[in-house]
Amino acid sequence: MTPYQRIKNQILRRLAQGKATFWQLVNYQDSHLVDFLEAIKELLKEGLIKYEKPFFYLSSSYAGLPYEDPGCLFCNSFSKSKFWQELLERFKELTKDRPLPTSDYDQGFIRPIDTVRRVAFIYERGDLERTEVFILGDDDLLSLAMALTKLPKRVVVVEIDERINEFIRKKTKEIGYEALEVYNYNVIDSLPSHLERSFDVFFTDPVETEKGLKLFVSRCISSLKGKGSVGYMGFTHREASLRKWRDFEKFLIDSGFVITDILRDFTTYPEAENQWEDFYRTYRIMQEFDLELPDVDWYKSCLLRFEVVKGPYLLPIDKPKDLEELYFDDEAWATPLPSYLEKKEGR
Amino acid sequence: MTPYQRIKNQILRRLAQGKATFWQLVNYQDSHLVDFLEAIKELLKEGLIKYEKPFFYLSSSYAGLPYEDPGCLFCNSFSKSKFWQELLERFKELTKDRPLPTSDYDQGFIRPIDTVRRVAFIYERGDLERTEVFILGDDDLLSLAMALTKLPKRVVVVEIDERINEFIRKKTKEIGYEALEVYNYNVIDSLPSHLERSFDVFFTDPVETEKGLKLFVSRCISSLKGKGSVGYMGFTHREASLRKWRDFEKFLIDSGFVITDILRDFTTYPEAENQWEDFYRTYRIMQEFDLELPDVDWYKSCLLRFEVVKGPYLLPIDKPKDLEELYFDDEAWATPLPSYLEKKEGR
């Protein structure tokens, strides 16, 4: 996706609602005035829109979905839009028998409303319509929420947990979405070559160890097409220090990205639904202080968006030497001990 | 301000509302679990709080303001809190005869509610209470909104426009806040030495030319105390490309900061109140396309927050060689031509 394509998406779907002035349109897209004007000029030249001062309007009908305002994504989401409300209800229904987290892969899922909020934020940015999306690790079932919108051109999930892969495959069939592919994949391995340089957008919720973090994101970067492609990820303050954040931001910028959004504590991990009471006994935080099990949802993560300005470049990284190094470092105080590590001496 | 001090602020003001569990408290502060637990332990050791499993509570009364929830800062702000509602009303009343923008300094102010939202966001982060705040350029009158809270230890404004300086001085007296100082200052000059390395927090809304941007922020960086100090700034997509954003983010990270928040289009510049119809005829965007004056508010800016992890380091920068280079580059398409430049040949 070129940057202009993203702006054009944003302009066309807005005009599908009705005519708009230049200044009204500015508010429905994300780019610099120079790029916005360039996108407008291209659309005029292509004959897709017309200008009768002061209004722009569509020349013919629009094949896609006219702009659906999801409302405020920080609190009262979806109250204005039947499209988004129905999407949330369908997503909840579709995923109610989802697999529960296993400590073997440091799993935990976010609230269904937060998954749909993530989709809506991606949609707002013009990153969903007619794009090819790569998802590394999907216990949140983001792919299914995207599939329900029917907006992306293609969604590919790579995930290590066969239970989740089976679940996604089954549900995809149920809803009759054919553009979703699921592959069994271990992040330790290189990305299969047929998935390299093929996507406009990636999403991942990486492990947050120094080495694991870069490994996850590096695999994702190798999936991107190039300039104008974007990455999204969840990242916490709970288990990642500001020193680690800074080091990781430097990595992103050196890889050719600009960071465009950092939404603090955008998503919440619900304690009750995750049923991970058993995990707590192995959390380091429980060993460091005399605590009872949580009485509120407290594990939250920020949403980051970053866009390729140059490259992207695949920088050399230190790969974790084993699963212990993938899941644990000095900052991982709320990460469960996988069963295969519990038996090891010295822990 | 040390990072622990910020967390302690956030914990104490929450406990001033009533006792809370460990997990409840986590949700009222921003830091990593390790730092949070360290702050808790220090507060216990200092005797300021007590722990009777599962609750933490204050040992004695709290001298400051118990936590006041400003609500969702993206839409329905301040609906839950009389404190914030009254602050907004008082700020509007106090500033209703504010100076209008002059094209000589590329001015324009944000909506009063957005100024108070900025204060509330700074408050939420624990960056307002008992801190020393440096503001470079203040036609938004952020200093007065902060003064009305009476929370900071000290607020210093440096600003080139004597009309604004006089206005702030007069209003500060009116409200009887003694910890606000105002200095006449041109960003081209070095910061007076008595203002160097003296502040916990800075705020600036810089010009967005490549050279101007770094000049503004560099002056601000020289005002900060060190590790744990934070910067806030407004930055737009309207007049700054993603290439410029990336270059600037690299500058921040190289200066020792981590970027913690990027809130897209957090603030709006109201057309009617700014009365800048006259400015438009000199905007480059009006010369590039046949446009009428705006019928909606369209100029918006993002809010960035960044925190010192190392240093901060004062990097060498290219200073603009004159006022034209300070205010104009290829991306400044909605910047008014100052009167002293209008007379120059060739423009």
Image (spheres, coloured by chain):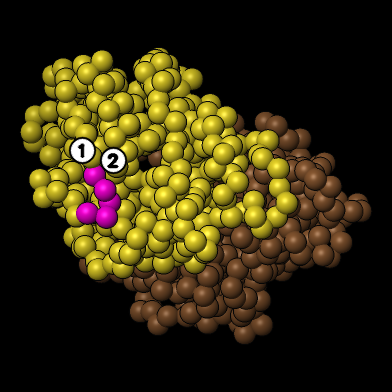
Chain colours: A brown, B yellow
What secondary structure is found at the residue carrying circle 2? strand
Residue that appears at 34% across and 45% down? B204
In the image: residue A323, left or right of residue B191: right
| Disc 2: host chain | B
What's under tag 1, amino acid-wise?
Tyr
Residue A203: image location, x then y, percent = 57, 62
The residue indicated by pointer 1 is B183
Residue A197: image location, x then y, percent = 62, 79
Which residue appears farthest toward the left when viewing the image? B46
The residue indicated by pointer 2 is B159
Q: Is residue A278 above or below residue B111?
A: below
In the image: residue B299, left or right of residue A174: left
Q: Which residues are magenta?
A: B185-189
Q: Which of the 4 quarters of the picture holds residue A330?
A: bottom left
Quadrant holding the N terminus of chain B: top left
What secondary structure is found at the residue carrying circle 1? strand
Q: Are marks 2 and 1 on the same chain?
A: yes
Residue A111: image location, x then y, percent = 56, 43
Task: Compare residues A73 and B255 and report the one nearer the observer.
Answer: B255
Is residue B186 shown in magenta?
yes
Report if the CB atoms under discs 2 and 1 are less than 8 Å apart: yes
